[in-house]
Image (cartoon, grey):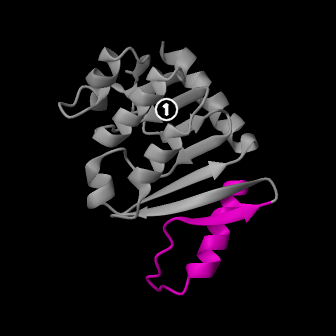
Amino acid sequence: MLLVVAVLLLWEHFADGSSKNISGHTVLFDRGAVNVYFSPRGGAEDAIVDAIDDAHKTLDIAIYTFTSRSISQAVVRAHDRGVEVRIVMDDDQARDRYSKYRYLKRRGIPIVLYTGDGIMHNKFAVIDTQTVITGSFNWTASAEEYNYENLLIIDSPEVARIYEDYFTEMWNKFR
């Protein structure tokens, strides 16, 4: 519901077709906030890195394509400072030569690969069961520099619990 309200508010405000830059704006709610980013070059990659750098206890990531050096380094930093990190990735994308799968695995980060029919096309992270990072934004340099993507960072324990349950279901099923 929170996400629907955020999208409707943004649509209503910017539906006139103007090209206003709304990256980095925050929509406040009674019980949370949504930070909105767009690419190319809208700060989405930096926002992901900052959010991961703020993680204290847990970081669960379900990601389709992961080639971003800066985001993978932030994940390793979180792991090295004691944050419990778990990642679910799509098998085909994880095997790509530019994927950060091998880099993260070598650093001891638990990763489960989805190998079933179809693809694991999610692009989200849950931080400390408080914050959700989600949207069409692939964790790649191309997404930040060239692609037209969106990213929401949702500060809401209610939304985070829903995503956390979904992540845990995938984690347990794909192991």
Residue 78 shown left or right of residue 45 in the figure: right
What residue lies at 49% left-to-right and 23% top-to-bottom?
81
Q: In the displayed image of the protein, which residue is found farthest to the front?
A: 81
Question: Where is residue 103, by image quadrant?
Answer: top left
* In the image, residue 119 above or below residue 150: above
From where the camera sits, is residue 64 visible?
A: no
Q: Tag 1, which secondary structure? A: strand
Question: Where is residue 10, by image quadrant?
Answer: bottom right
Report the front residue among 166 and 79: 79
Task: Residue 154: give x, y in percent of width and height.
Answer: 63, 51
Q: In the displayed image of the protein, which residue is found farthest to the left?
A: 97
Tell how many labels. 1
Task: Residue 5: give x, y in percent of width and height.
Answer: 71, 63
| Magenta-drawn stretch contains 30 | no
What residue lies at 49% left-to-right and 39% top-to-bottom?
53
Question: Where is residue 162, by image quadrant?
Answer: top right
What residue lies at 53% left-to-right and 47% top-to-bottom?
134
* In the image, residue 29 above or below residue 85: below
Task: Residue 15: give x, y in percent of width and height.
Answer: 56, 81
Residue 156 shown left or right of residue 72 in the figure: right
What residue lies at 60% left-to-right and 23% top-to-bottom?
168
| Magenta-drawn stretch contains 20 | yes
In the image, the segment drawn in magenta is: 1-29
Mark 1, residues whose alpha carbon is within 10 Å: few (<14), some, or many (≥20)? Answer: many
Query: Which residue has dot 1 on it?
Result: 61
Q: Amino acid at mark 1?
A: Ile
Task: Residue 83: give x, y in percent of width and height.
Answer: 54, 24
From where the camera sits, is residue 9 visible?
A: yes
